[in-house]
Image: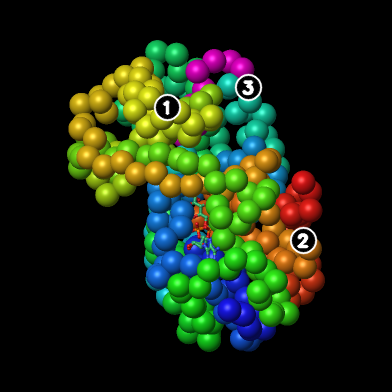
Amino acid sequence: MRIRSEIVIAGAGVIGASVAYHLARRGCKDILVIDRASDFGAGSTLKATGGFRAQFDNETEVRLSLLAREKLRAFEDEIGCDSGYRPYGYLFLARNEQELDDLRRTQTMQHACGLTEARMVSPDEARELSPMIEDDALAGGAFCPTDGFIRAGKILRGYADAAKRLGVRFQFDTELRDWSDVDARVKIEARGAWSGAPVVPTRRNAVATVVTDIVAETTPMTVWAGDWYHFRVRDGRVLLLWPDDPLIDDDAWLEEVKRFTRERAPRLLTLPIEESWSGFYEMTPDKHSLLGERNGIYCATGASGHGVMHAPALGHLLAELIVDGRTSIDVSALDPNRF
Ligand SMILES: Cc1cc2nc3c(=O)[nH]c(=O)nc-3n(C[C@H](O)[C@H](O)[C@H](O)COP(=O)(O)OP(=O)(O)OC[C@H]3O[C@@H](n4cnc5c(N)ncnc54)[C@H](O)[C@@H]3O)c2cc1C
């Protein structure tokens, strides 16, 4: 079956929806988004835990997050619904001087990019911010109060509904097998983990405890910088995560998560685990998105686990590139031809 439209976007996840909306808002017509699933949310987007941060270790992603944050703050006015952005912070923890130095050095770069509110914290201040921490090895941390949380489903539906109001068509049960089956002036790859090389689907697990009141909803995302074991509270439940690499089997993964919890936040172990799920990160070799044109196809994919938080910025910037031929921030580090 041939797929015909002026603009065809493959993938109706949060990024495809954001790209569609931003192109339509810039006046583009005849936009078709295809997806092999029968409705929204079949990919990674609804698996996301909903963290938002600008504390990245490279300038490009700090700037992407600052643009995304501006758009998340304006989401309700622009899109008509709440993005769920709540600035409860991200707290990165160091367990030795080397990790603390790395956080300090990274923060200097973040300040230079304009993230001036990020600050270093002492072990006592870290425990005040996230009272479940009981880690004897704690050396200090980095905290940014404007980082926090977002709602993946609301952002996806918000952009999709706003795009539809501007005339974008979404066609489900339509699998893209090969781009040569598509007749379009503009072709856009947004199939996330299923985009093909150099994007590799990488499985990620998460568990959620029962509802509890021992940890406040406003507790920052609490991340041990050395191994990325982290927890957050969502709808009263504590989510425990550890993006292991390379991936071990599920039982071994859970044992390791429990071991980290016993060592660093043992009171959380009193909470029974009620739910577990897994999904796919859309990893590129350098863990940065692909944004730009490659072999006649525009890419907005490979966000490597940051796709929900960066979707507002990636859609905005790809629309600029397609309509204006250039972007308002430097995204040369995301050039899809770099591999
Ligand atoms: C456990 C977990 C936690 C996460 N936590 C966070 C977080 O805190 N913050 C954050 O920003 N991100 C997080 N992520 C990552 C985030 O979910 C992804 O980066 C994001 O959803 C990618 O969006 P996407 O639109 O590129 O892909 P998807 O949402 O996967 O959408 C891709 C779409 O393409 C469709 N598709 C696939 N193949 C084809 C085909 N051949 N033809 C047509 N359609 C096709 C799929 O059906 C799907 O609808 C997390 C991910 C996981 C798994």
- The local crowd at label 2, few if under 14, some if 14 to 19, many if 20 or more residues have their Cα within 10 Å, is some
What amino acid type is highlighted by mark number 2?
Answer: Arg
- The local crowd at label 3, few if under 14, some if 14 to 19, many if 20 or more residues have their Cα within 10 Å, is few
Q: Quadrant of residue 217?
A: top left
Residue 101: which disc?
Answer: 3
Q: Tell me, yes or no, if residue 24 can be seen here.
A: no
Q: Nearer the viewer, residue 182 or 120?
A: 182
Tell me the residue at 59%/63% (across/down).
190
Left or right, 4 with reference to 240: right
What amino acid type is highlighted by mark number 3?
Answer: Asp
**Precedes in sequence: disc 1 or disc 2:** 1
Q: Quadrant of residue 204?
A: top left
Q: Tell me, yes or no, if residue 215 can be seen here.
A: yes
| 58 versus 292 height, above or below | above
Residue designated by label 2: 294
Label 2: which secondary element: strand
| 286 versus 258 height, above or below | below
- The local crowd at label 1, few if under 14, some if 14 to 19, many if 20 or more residues have their Cα within 10 Å, is some
Q: Nearer the viewer, mark 1 or mark 2?
A: 2
Residue designated by label 1: 125
Tell me the residue at 43%/47% (across/down).
279
Q: Nearer the viewer, mark 1 or mark 3?
A: 3
Distance from Cα at disc 1 to Cα at disc 3? 18 Å
Q: Position of residue 166 (x, y in %)?
A: 53, 85
Q: Nearer the viewer, residue 239 or 236?
A: 239
